[in-house]
Amino acid sequence: MKEQELYLKTGSAIKDAEESQMFGKPCFKVNGKAFMCFFEKCMVFKLTGKEHKEALALDGSQLFDPSKKGRAMKEWVQVPFDYSDKWKKYAKAAYDYVKG
């Protein structure tokens, strides 16, 4: 399965998640707030706590910097397709975090 197809499948499987845009990139939101997006064949998640630390420790993961100007978004972690088996877990954690 290609990266974007898996992104859509993952987001669509989450109840109450709505497809939208964030910084011109496809994203999913809950209650009008983004919790995950798709960028450069990676999934990007808004995370906190244990999940944030774990996702950031994955080889190739990094803080999300959509402008490429050294202004990373501290809660957002960009996770490469190599770890697509973890995307569902992080999507749920991001959804739970944003939903409150």
Image: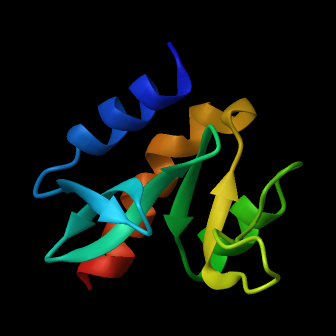
Q: Quadrant of residue 83?
A: top right
- Tell me if residue 23 comes above or below residue 79 in the rendering: below
Q: Is residue 69 left or right of residue 24?
A: right
- Tell me if residue 8 comes above or below residue 70 in the rendering: above
Task: Give the residue drawn at x 33%, y 34%.
Answer: 8
Colour scheme used in the picture? rainbow
Q: For the view shown, which residue lies furthest in the right direction? A: 59
Task: Give the residue drawn at x 33%, y 66%.
Answer: 95
Q: Is residue 87 left or right of residue 100?
A: right
The x and y percentages for residue 38 are 49, 48
Toward the viewer: 88 or 78?
78
Q: How many badges with numbers are in the image?
A: 0
Task: Give the residue drawn at x 62%, y 37%.
Answer: 41
Q: Is residue 6 left or right of residue 82?
A: left
The x and y percentages for residue 73 are 63, 83
The x and y percentages for residue 51 are 61, 68
- Tell me if residue 5 comes above or below residue 32 in the rendering: above
Q: Is residue 98 left or right of residue 36?
A: left
- Tell me if residue 12 comes above or below residue 24 in the rendering: above
Q: Quadrant of residue 56?
A: bottom right
Task: Give the residue drawn at x 26%, y 85%.
Answer: 100
